Image (cartoon, helix red, strand yellow):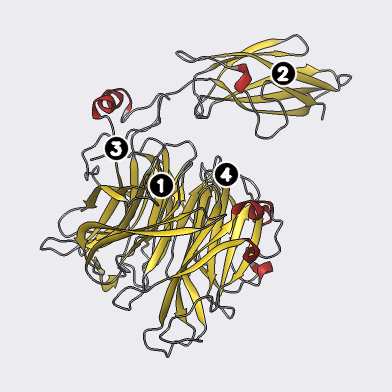
Amino acid sequence: MKTYSRSLLAVFAAAFIGGSYAPGRAGALDLMNGFEGINSGWIPADPIIAAGPRSLVTMVSGRIAIFSKQGAKLFEQNLGAGGFWSAQGADQVAEPWVIFDPDSRRFIAIAAEFGSAKGRLYLAVSNDSEPRGSADWHKYRLDRTGTHQNPSFPGVPTYPDYAKVGVDSDAIYITSVHFAKNQSITASFSHAEMFALEKTPLLSGGLAEAADAIVYDAPVLIDPSGLPISIHPAVVFGPAPAMYFVQSVARFADNKVVVHGLANVLSAPTHVVSPVTVAAFDRPPNVPQRGSTDLLENIDARLMSAVVRNGSLWTAHGIRDPLVDSESLVRWYQFDVTGLPNTDAVLLQSGNVDPGAGRHAWLPHINVDARDNMGLVFSVGGAGEYASIGYTGQRVTDPDGETLPVRIARAGAGPYTQGGWGEYSGLAIDPDGSTFWLFHQYPTKQKTWRTFVGAFEVAGPPPPSDPLHCGDLDGIGANSGKNWKATVTATIHDGDHHAIEGATVSIAWSTGATATGVTDATGKATFTLNSISKQVAAVALAIQGVSYLGLTYSLMENHDPDADSDGTTITVNKP
């Protein structure tokens, strides 16, 4: 059972689920926004996304792009030669992964080298929460060739593959799987690895070598079959007793999910392993498609994402349908990890996403919002249809193990015949705590892949909370004939830093003029003072008050992330 008060949640749901306190917002699972993503020509695509306060970082094999949340492309570049990591010696860079750290509010990206320098990983940490280009990142190279050895072929150089990155308040955590560089070796899989880097020096860019920040480095043993395994790090929201990783047997039947806990990573690292019994699963099949005999690749039953929030760890993978039709389903889990590392992880609930008879779901990514509403994105397809981007979710008030009906974010337009459908998908949670951003691939009429970005909410935004305050003040001066004018935009937030639409803002200019304005859907109210004499070098605007039904305004909570004001008063200089 989930540890929630269902009676209280039922009252909450009656008021807010499927609706919003902001007029015009979409209901549960409605696609609120969507636009075309990037393409690199690499096979497979491997799309991944992270969401910051104002922008989205998207990556596919070989390429990175940053978008505004309205879909405007702010930056795009190759990852390898002549591109994003070129100064670190990158050549052919693929299988990227990117996250947004809720603690430092930075983007963190990882990718692997598949060119002549195979054996390297590349790491990037954004300078702040709003990178606009390649220069806005601290970038590092990690040479991981032969960091650990497989007893079956000692001394054989290995290279990392399928690198993933996770984070908690202390460190950045990287996992990968290693293969022998000599591909003639039978069963060339060597080992998996997990290592941790102290986060603080990487945020400042003060280290010449990222390896100088490594505080923990260990191999993860192969599974009993000798086949490749992968271990996935979590993104941890808020304080937690440990960092967490998830692992599952990838290529044969099992009934265990292994939860790893790594505690005290900066002082005396302690690694504990907690196998948890779950419903039996097996490797999922490849997927048939309309218009072609080519099967779409389904990888295996590895766990493909992990997030820890409010004491729960959520993860998901593709499995073979345990019923007679043997299609591919998405299986998801919620574990209680509040006791780990001192006690074992506990399975709270799990469920299967089955899009219907003859249809498959695979390559899932899971995330969870601030109120424990869960979202999932995945591929949907079958013999009678082209592959599409599917998504669903579970509201915190829904019965254990159940999800909402599957929605289609972007329908496929033709069969895909290029090989290598993909190894994962992307689903980010916005810092607003309620908006999910999906990023996945779909096939075109030309039988190639393209990507799509979409936004949805599982249960709508939370109700506004005290204290009401100014979260940003921006001002600019501009010439206006023989005079000049000053324009100031105030952004109003509630106590959870969500933008408030419909708040009334009262202001006063230093000239004595006053005005009121009402915030729009982004929480912004704009004020302009015209006809200022050019004899006046500067004017100031001060917020006199903010009102919104049911909320209390707190002057003391006003702030400005740009540091160009104190959140209450801003000076605008003559242009």
> Eyeballing the image, is 388 above or below 537?
below
Identify the secondary structure beneath mark 2: strand
The image quarter containing residue 76 is bottom right
Few, some or many residues within 10 Å of mark 4 (<14, 14–19, 20+): some
Query: What residue sits 34% from the left and 68% below the top?
Result: 416
Q: Residue furthest right?
A: 535
Q: Going by the image, does 65 lie left or right of 567?
A: left
Q: Which of labels 4 and 2 is toward the front?
A: 4
Q: In this view, does 333 lie above or below 446?
A: above
Q: Check disc 1 and give the amino acid type.
A: Val
Residue 78 position in % (x across, y down): 59, 65
- State how far apart marks 3 and 4 are (Cα): 26 Å
Q: Which residue is drawn at 58% across and 66% down?
A: 122
In the rendering, at what x and y percent does residue 432 appear? 48, 36
Q: Quadrant of the C terminus?
A: top right
Query: For numbered disc 1, what is the local secondary structure?
Result: strand
Residue 233 visible in the picture: yes
Q: Nearer the viewer, mark 1 or mark 3?
A: 1
How dense is the environment of label 2, judged by Cα within 10 Å: few (below 14), some, or many (20 and up)?
many
Query: What type is the residue that disc 2 sits on?
Result: Leu
Question: Around disc 1, counting alpha carbons within 10 Å, would you say few (fewer than 14), some (14 to 19), or many (20 or more)?
Answer: many
Residue linked to disc 1: 308
- The x and y percentages for residue 133 are 65, 53
Q: Are marks 1 and 2 in contact (CB under 8 Å)?
A: no
Q: Which mark is residue 550?
A: none
Q: How far apart are marks 4 and 1 (CA)?
A: 16 Å
Contact between marks 3 and 2 (CB within 8 A): the answer is no
Residue at mark 4: 105
Using the numbered discs, state the Cα–Cα distance from disc 1 to disc 3 in whole angstroms: 17 Å
Q: Earlier in the sequence, mark 1 or mark 3?
A: 1
What's the mark number on residue 541?
2
